[in-house]
Amino acid sequence: MANLITSSRLLLLALVILIVYFGSPGLQLFNLLLVVLMFVSDGLDGYVARKRNETSLFGALFDVAADRIVELSLWVVFAHIGLLPIWIPLLYIARGIITDSIRASEAQTNQQTPFASMQTRIARIVVAGQFIRAFYAVLKALTFFVLILLVPLPQLAPEFWQQYGAGLELLSLALAYACVVLCIARGLPVITQFLREQAPAHEK
C-alpha cells in the first residue's frame, strides 16, 4: 500500500506538468490542489508503511527516488518556463546524483535505509531529523505552490498581477533560495561522512 501511494505521487507529477504546459488558466489553479496532494502523499506513504508494518529497504529507497523525481522535475519545469534561474535545477541535479549514489552504495553495503546510515549527531539532526525533513518538505511545497500560482495569475487577474506580481515573483525566488540553502546543508553531511569513511586509516 505504501509503495502504491508513492507511485501515485509520480502520476500526480505527470498531471501537474501537463497542466503547466497545456492547461487553461482556470485549470492551472487545479494544479495548486495537486501539489498539495503530492506533498501530503510524501508523508502519508511513510506513515502507512509504519502503521501496516510494511517498512523495507526497497520502500525507503523508492520513496527517496520518487521525492527526487518530483522535485527535480518541478525545478526543471519552472526554470524552463522562465520562473527560476537555470542554476537552481542544475545544482539540485548535481547534489541529488552525488548524495543518492552515496546512499545507494551504503544501502547495498550496510543494508541500511538512507537516513539510518547517518552517524554523527549533526548529520542525524540535519539529514535524518523529523523536524528538518518536515520543514524542508513544507518549504518546497510552499515554493512550488507560489510558482504554480504565478503561471495563470497574469491572465486570471491582470490588475492584481500588475500591482503585486513583482512582489510575488520576489517571494518565489526568496523561497527557492531558502530551499537551495537547505538542499546544500542537508547534502554536505552525507558527502563529508562518505569522504571520511573512504579516507585511509592514517588520515582519519
Image (cartoon, rainbow, N blue to C red):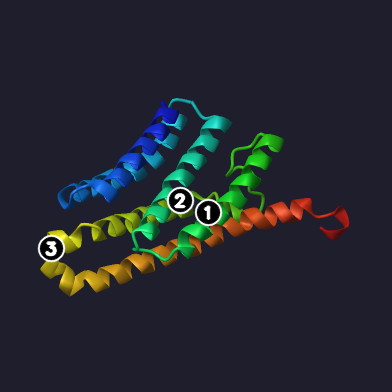
Q: Relative to residue 151, is residue 177 depicted above or below?
A: below
- Marks 2 and 3, how far apart at CA: 29 Å
Q: Is residue 169 left or right of residue 111?
A: left
- Sequence order check: which comes first, mark 2 or mark 3? 2
- Marks 3 and 1, how far apart at CA: 34 Å
Q: Is residue 108 left or right of residue 48?
A: right
- Marks 2 and 1, how far apart at CA: 7 Å
Residue that carries the numbered disc 2 in the rendered image: 72
Task: Kindly identify the amino acid type of the residue bearing the numbered disc 3.
Answer: Ala
Residue at image coords 55%, 37%: 61
State the SS at label 3.
loop
Task: Kindly identify the amino acid type of the residue bearing the numbered disc 1.
Answer: Ile
Q: Which residue is outermost to the right?
A: 202
Q: Are marks 2 and 1 in contact (CB under 8 Å)?
A: yes
Within 10 Å of the Cα at label 2, are there few (<14), some (14-19), or many (20+) other Cα atoms? some
Between 100 and 158, the one lying in front of the other is 158
State the SS at label 1.
helix
Residue at image coords 75%, 55%: 196
- Sequence order check: which comes first, mark 2 or mark 1? 2
Q: Is residue 131 left or right of residue 154?
A: right
Residue at image coords 38%, 53%: 77
Residue 135 visible, this angle:
no
Between 184 and 15, the one lying in front of the other is 15
Task: Kindly identify the amino acid type of the residue bearing the numbered disc 2.
Answer: Leu
State the quadrant of the N terminus.
top left
x%, y% of residue 28?
21, 50
Residue that carries the numbered disc 1 in the rendered image: 93
Residue that carries the numbered disc 3 in the rendered image: 157
State the quadrant of the C terminus.
bottom right
